[in-house]
Amino acid sequence: MSATPLIRRLDTRADGFAATLRQLLAFESGEDASIEQAVQGILADVRTRGDDAVLEYTQRFDRHAARDISALEIPLAEAQAALAALPAEQRAALETAAERIRLYHERQRAESWSYTEADGTRLGQKITPLDRVGLYVPGGKAAYPSSLLMNAIPAKVAGVGDIVMVTPMPDGTRNPIVLAAAAIASVDRIWAIGGAQAVGALAYGTQSITPVDKVVGPGNAYVAAAKRRVFGTIGIDMIAGPSEILVICDGQTPPDWIAMDLFSQAEHDELAQSILLCPDAAYLDAVEASIARLLPEMPRADIIRTSLRDRGALILVRDLDEACAIANDIAPEHLEISTAEPERWADQIRHAGAIFMGRFSSESLGDYCAGPNHVLPTSRTARFSSPLGVYDFQKRSSLIQVSEAGAATLGRVAATLAYGEGLQAHARSAELRLEKP
C-alpha cells in the first residue's frame, strides 16, 4: 500500500481539472453556532454593563488578577521602556521595517480636490481621516509586532488622531516586542484586553474606553465573529480567511527556495494553502523532493504537512500564459512570479492581494519589511478587495457649492427628474431658487 503523498499533483490537461481545482480552493469559514451565541451574549453584556463586563471577562478568560478596569491599561511609558530594553539587532529590525512601511504608505495618502465650472459652481472632494481607530493585536502564544506596524502606521499616516490598541495578556504577561512595536508606531492607548469583549468595548464604548470609528487587526474565531456583529455600528478592515500563496515558476528557480516559500504559508495553520504552477514536470518532481527533504527540519512540520496534504498542490500547466489565467481565477492573497522577465507575466495578472516579482522576492519579505501592507484579501476576495492601506483610514466627503447661475440651470434639470419620480418637495426645493425673492 503506497504512502499518502506529501502534496497532490494536478495537471491542467486532465479531465475534470477545473472541478478538482475548484474543490481544492473551496473554503467555507462557516459560523460556529456556539461561538456566535457566546459572542452575541458577550457583546450585549459589554454594551449594557461596560467596564464591569470587560473586567469580568478578562478575569475569566485571561486569568487576569486586575480588580479594577484601570489596572488593565498599560502606561505608554511601559511601551517605551520595552523598546529601550530590546536587543539592539531586534530594535533595529523593527525600526527599519517601520520606516519602510511608513515611506510606502505615505505615497497612498489622498488629498482634497475641487474644480470650478464656467458658471461659478464649485465641485470637489474633501478628504478627512477617521477620528479614532481600534487596533486588535493577538496575544497569548502568538506575538505579531509586524502586524501591529502594518495596521497602526497607515492609520498614523492617514492622520488618525487616536489609536487605541487592545491585546490579551493571559495571566498578566506582557509581550515586550509587541509593546516595543506599539511605541515605534506611536499608539496612543494600550489596554490589556482581548476577545469579543475587547471588540465590544471598542465598538460601543465603556465608562473608561471611548468608542472608535473602526476596528482593524487579526484575531481568533471569537474576534472575527465579534467584528462581523459590530460592523455597521463601526467599520472593520476585513474578515480574513486562511493564508495563501500561489507561485508561478518557469522551472529555473532553485527548488529548495520554492519549497520553503510554500512552507512559509503552510506553517501558519492547517487550513493555509500553498500552490505551485509550472510548465516543467521534472521541476515539479524536484520541488516535491525538496519538500520531502526539508520538511522534517521544520519546527512546525506537523502543521505544514497537514496544510500541504489537504489544501496544497503542484500543478503542471501548459505554459506560463495558462498559469496567469489560473492565477486570475484563484485570485490569491500572495502571488510569487518566480520567472525571468516577471514584469511580462505580472502585466497579465488582474487579481492578487500582493504580487512578488522575480526570484529574489520571497513572500516572507512582504510579511515583515518590504513596505507594502501584509494585511491582504484572502479566499478569492482579491477579485474585489485591496490590501489594507491609508485609504482605509481616510474618508471622502463630496463638496457642492452651486452658484446662482448654476442653480438656474441645474434647478430645471433636478425639478424635471424629481417630478418624474413623484417627489414634489424635491422639485419645489430646486424651483424656488429659480424664482427671484
Image: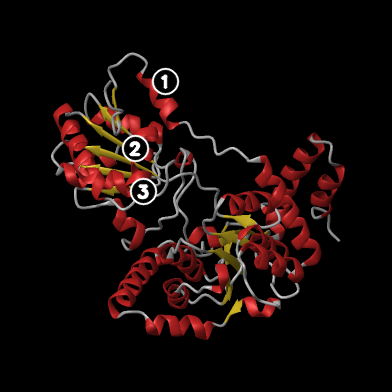
Q: In the rendering, at what x and y percent does residue 198 appear?
A: 64, 63
Asked whether, in this view, residue 114 is left or right of residue 305, the answer is right
The residue drawn where x is 35% and y is 20% is 17
| Residue 139 visible to an observer of this rendering | yes
Do the numbered discs 3 and 2 sit on residues whose CB atoms are within 8 Å?
A: no
Q: Circle 2 — which element?
A: helix
C-alpha gap between disc 1 and disc 3:
27 Å
The residue drawn where x is 37% and y is 66% is 101
Instruction: Identify the disc placed on residue 19.
Output: 1
Instruction: Identify the disc placed on residue 88.
Output: none
C-alpha gap between disc 3 and disc 2:
9 Å
The residue drawn where x is 44% and y is 64% is 143
Mark 1 vs mark 3, foreground winner is: 3
The residue where tag 3 is placed is 267
Q: Quadrant of residue 306?
A: top left
Q: In the rendering, at what x and y percent does residue 378 appear?
A: 46, 43
Query: What amino acid does circle 2 point to?
Result: Leu
**Label 2 neighbourhood size at 10 Å, few (<14), some (14-19), many (20+)?**
many
- Way the structure is coloured: secondary structure
Q: Circle 3 — which element?
A: loop
**Label 1 neighbourhood size at 10 Å, few (<14), some (14-19), many (20+)?**
few
Query: What amino acid does circle 1 point to?
Result: Ala
The residue where tag 2 is placed is 308
Mark 2 vs mark 1, foreground winner is: 2
Query: What amino acid does circle 3 point to?
Result: Glu
C-alpha gap between disc 2 and disc 1:
19 Å
Do the numbered discs 1 and 3 sit on residues whose CB atoms are within 8 Å?
A: no
